[in-house]
Image: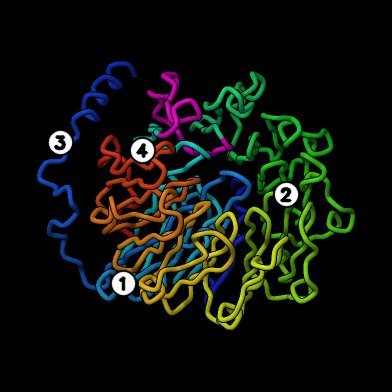
Amino acid sequence: MSPLSNLTVDIPHSGALRCLISCHSEAAEEAHPEMIRKSAKVDGTGPQNPVAEDELLVLGARACHRVVGTFRSNSYRLVSLNARTLEPIEAVWQYEDHDQSVTGIDFFDTNPSPPLLVTSGKQRLVLSRSNIIGNFPALCALRNDQKLHAWGWGENGGNLPPRLACLRDIREVASSMAAFAVRRAKGNVLAWGSAGNPSSCVPEEIAKRTDIVALYGGAYAFAALLSTGNLVTWGLKETGGDLPDRIARLSDIVHVQGSEFAFAAIRKNGHVVTWGHPDYGGALPDDIGKMSGVVQLASSGFAYALRRDDGSVAVWGRIAPMPERIAGLRDIVDIQGNAGAFAVRQASGQVDGWGDFTWDTPPAPITEYRDIVHFSPTSDGFVVLRANGQVDAWGAGAAANVPDTIKALTDVVGISTNHEAAVALRSNGEAVAWGDPEAGGDSSNVAPLLQNVRAVYGGTRTFVALREDARVVAWGDAHKGGTGEQKALYRRIAYSRKVAP
């Protein structure tokens, strides 16, 4: 079994446990998508397939290992619904390469590379591995045929190098600030992106390896997990690209979290190790280094936090001291960081937070909620999803002000965020956005296309929606990939497929 099997403990619960010729021919097809579009309506308003009684519907974005700016979300919630009633139904969730499974109406994805099996009664869906990811100025998609497609700011990853364009065996994509790295089926890695970002060039000694099983992005460096449980890194030395010998010798690493200036890793024994800039999380205090039972890591712009299996959290780096009211909690099930703050969700459905500014602490009525099932960071705030299908937010920035029309919704089942905007995914498949208009908060130009959506992925100032009919819609900053429907991906990328249970 892969070392990643140990990540099954890192699931925050809510409720129940829950090529040349082929390249030329495909290029011609991508230039004329109408050749394969047949009779599909371009406005998304055509007749829909009838829904069978009790048919399984799954919504939500798969996890990804990336850093886009000064923070990253590490909480990705999927939900299972009855496609006819749009009510939650219990399902069994299992990674394709794992023996273990969990049962529940939702699932927190921590492992982006294997397909995810979701079974309810006689219905089973196989969710594709994480297939849309952004870095700071560009976006990349992993197609059904395991080929890549990139767009956005060309010199920072939006232009796919010819040496990668014809590969058909990509298993995972990770990103740094201005580069992408991919893992192939045979266990080797490749990277591309900004010449000014050292993470875009894989050293020869690492490029020769064929035993890499997972990739993790920091802002200026990448870490790769080997089948032996060891790590290798490359990129800017000061931010984690130079792996210390004391960590390189370890053979029991099960998970890694990158940040802007450092990396942290969980060992099989539940302890944490760190490296990178010592002032911004790369130096682990002795008392935290002795802690065991660590099941989750989170990063802010200049600090790290961990969650233990006893429901407690600890923090280190450059961040305001954790308040005693949070330090004493023993029921924390999720922790997230934004640029300068951390927030926690409790088993009771409450949230709390702290940081460098007064707005980092949630105000009333958010502090009074007892039914929060998920939350996600923007650069200066947090967005929360309640069990009653409503959303709210706190902090600074445009995304902290949820429009009344969106606050009034009671059928939201998923939330996605980027630096300055947020998207609510409704149970009927409609995606609605708010926040900075230039960063994806205004989706009016693509609103007719934001129907039948299965997942929404956030870039830095963009969003990408993956629809049930294999259409991909991007909006937000056009320079960073928010350029509308990606016709080159039509019917070449899917959220899920049906199989016999």
Residue at 80% across, 63% down = 321
Real-space CA distance between mark 4 and mark 2, rounded to the nearest whole angstrom: 34 Å
Instruction: Give the extent of the magenta segment.
Output: 152-177
Name the residue type under label 4: Arg
Dot 4 corresponds to which residue? 143
Residue at 76% across, 76% down = 325
Dot 1 corresponds to which residue? 82
Residue 311: percent from the left, percent from the top? Answer: 71, 71
Q: How many marks?
A: 4
Q: In this rendered view, identify the residue nearer to me: 227 or 235.
A: 235
Name the residue type under label 2: Phe
- Element under disc 2: loop
Real-space CA distance between mark 2 and mark 3, rounded to the nearest whole angstrom: 48 Å
Q: In this rendered view, identify the residue nearer to me: 295 or 436.
A: 436
Q: Is residue 469 left or right of residue 495?
A: left
Sort mark 2 into few (<14), some (14-19) or many (20+) by Cα contacts within 10 Å.
Answer: many
